[in-house]
Image (tube, rainbow, N blue to C red):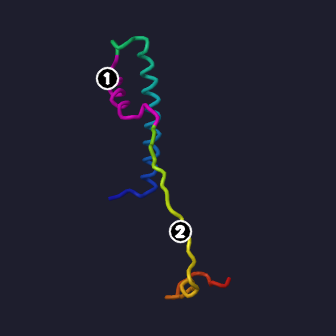
Amino acid sequence: MRLPSHIRRMISIWLAALLILLSFAASAHSVTHLDDGAKTHCTLCFHQHQFNKILLTQPLVLNLAVQRFDVVEFVLPVFLSKHISVYRSRAPPVLL
């Protein structure tokens, strides 16, 4: 059974907020080990190290190709550019 969309949205917002709070807590925790050196690392630091390998540490650079296109202009003959109604649409009238 699928949850309603507003419940899924609230869960995703709360999970995103929790991820942000946990990232701040992890960075604050890693600062506590700066003076002690590498001897006193705990298992939480190991997991943070594993998590930091997933995140980008360098700025993201996307090499996007610039799309080019040729502009083609041509004049349609009058009999081709005339509007022909094929079916009864619900659009506004042409002479408004």
Relative to the observer, which residue lies in front, 46 or 79?
Answer: 79
Does residue 46 show up magenta in the picture? yes
SS at badge 2: loop
Taking the spot 42% from the left edge, 52% from the top edge, the residue there is: 8
Q: Nearer the viewer, mark 2 or mark 1?
A: 2
Mark 2 to mark 1: distance in Å? 64 Å
Compared with residue 26, is residue 17 higher up or lower down, i.e. above or below?
Answer: below
Q: Amino acid at mark 1?
A: Thr
Q: Which mark is residue 70?
A: none
Q: Position of residue 79 (x, y in %)?
A: 55, 88
The C terminus lies in quadrant: bottom right
Taking the spot 47% from the left edge, 39% from the top edge, the residue there is: 17
Taking the spot 43% from the left edge, 15% from the top edge, the residue there is: 34
Asked if residue 86 lies left or right of residue 46, the reply is right
The N terminus lies in quadrant: bottom left
Q: Position of residue 37 (x, y in %)?
A: 38, 12
Please give the residue where the numbered disc 2 appears in the rendered image: 72
Please tell me which of labels 2 and 1 falls first in the chain.
1
Q: Which mark is residue 43?
A: 1
Q: Position of residue 15 (x, y in %)?
A: 43, 42
Taking the spot 35% from the left edge, 23% from the top edge, the residue there is: 45
Relative to the observer, which residue lies in front, 33 or 59?
Answer: 59
Asked if residue 92 lies left or right of residue 65, the reply is right
Asked if residue 87 lies left or right of residue 56, the reply is right
Q: Residue furthest right?
A: 96
Q: Amino acid at mark 2?
A: Val
Compared with residue 11, is residue 57 higher up or lower down, i.e. above or below?
Answer: above
Over which residues does the magenta segment extend? Answer: 41-59
SS at badge 1: helix
Asked if residue 4 lies left or right of residue 81, the reply is left
